[in-house]
Image (cartoon, grey):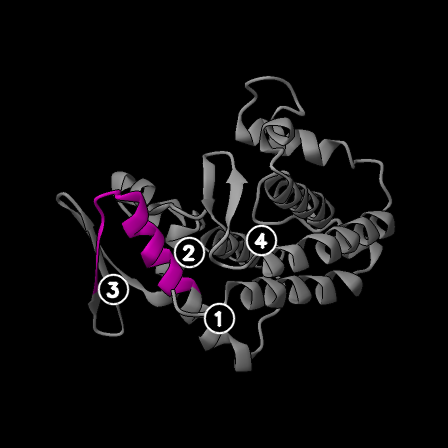
């Protein structure tokens, strides 16, 4: 990746902030694409992501990961972090999230792409991890239907596609992705499918409808969820 991950992360954060700032009480309760999570729950999850970023910068990821108990899995931890804000008013939760972003994102940029950051998998290149953070924000923005303008749509899709293909190569999942017309042919073993650019990004994000791909191929494509 030759682009700037910090700019991409900040752009996605601004889009989410602008959208959430204008929601009515009823709109906060609209369900997201994540089963059981409305928009308030998603904001609580984004606050949890910011906790993880700060823990990575502080070298305290083990403590972050064990908040809900020793050995608790990722999904259970997410639910724990969301439940703790169940009674938090949305305006207070939004203010807390903004404070987290204002504290951690400049620290990422200050450390720079060549630094390392603590993660649940150990030390990892900070610049590359910031791409994962930017992707996660983009995925969750789509989950809660944050609008994307025509002016930003193509550029946003392009960087997400580039990093998705890069992540597929990094994880070594054995999936082949080849350009085909105005889309891509993806294959794993004897399973093949043709996807548009947008659908390939959705597939790597774990958001493509399950009936669109053979089961093994669909699971192998998920690298960003």
Q: Nearer the viewer, residue 196 or 49?
A: 49
Q: Nearer the viewer, residue 29 or 127?
A: 127
Per the image, label 1 sits on a secondary structure element best described as helix
Per the image, label 2 sits on a secondary structure element best described as helix
Q: Which mark is residue 140?
A: 4
C-alpha separation, residue under disc 1 versus residue under disc 4? 14 Å
Q: Residue furthest bottom?
A: 151
C-alpha separation, residue under disc 1 versus residue under disc 2? 13 Å
Precedes in sequence: disc 1 or disc 3: 1
Q: Which residue is mark 2?
A: 202
> Is residue 102 highlighted in magenta?
no
Per the image, label 3 sits on a secondary structure element best described as strand
Residue 48 drawn at (x, y percent): 67, 41
C-alpha separation, residue under disc 1 versus residue under disc 3? 18 Å
Magenta-tinted stretch: 160-178
Q: Which residue is mark 3?
A: 184
């Amino acid at each position: 990746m030759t682009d700037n991950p910090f700019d991409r992360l900040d752009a996605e954060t601004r889009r989410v902030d602008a959208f959430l700032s204008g929601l009515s009480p009823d709109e906060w309760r609209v369900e997201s694409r994540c089963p059981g999570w409305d928009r308030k729950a998603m904001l609580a999850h984004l606050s949890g992501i910011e906790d993880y970023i700060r823990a990575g910068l502080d070298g305290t990821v083990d403590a972050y990961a064990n908040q809900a108990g020793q050995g608790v899995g990722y999904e259970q931890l997410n639910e724990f972090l969301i439940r703790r804000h169940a009674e938090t008013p949305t305006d207070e939760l939004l203010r807390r999230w903004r404070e987290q972003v204002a504290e951690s994102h400049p620290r990422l940029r200050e450390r720079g792409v060549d630094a390392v950051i603590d993660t649940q998998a150990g030390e990892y290149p900070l610049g590359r991890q910031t791409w994962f953070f930017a992707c996660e924000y983009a995925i969750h923005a789509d989950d809660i239907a944050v609008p994307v303008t025509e002016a930003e749509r193509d550029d946003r899709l392009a960087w997400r596609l580039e990093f998705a293909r890069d992540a597929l190569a990094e994880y070594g999942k054995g999936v082949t992705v080849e350009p085909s017309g105005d889309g891509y042919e993806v294959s794993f073993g004897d399973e093949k499918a043709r996807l548009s650019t947008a659908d390939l990004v959705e597939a790597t994000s774990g958001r493509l409808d399950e009936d669109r791909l053979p089961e093994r191929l669909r699971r192998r494509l998920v690298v960003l969820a």
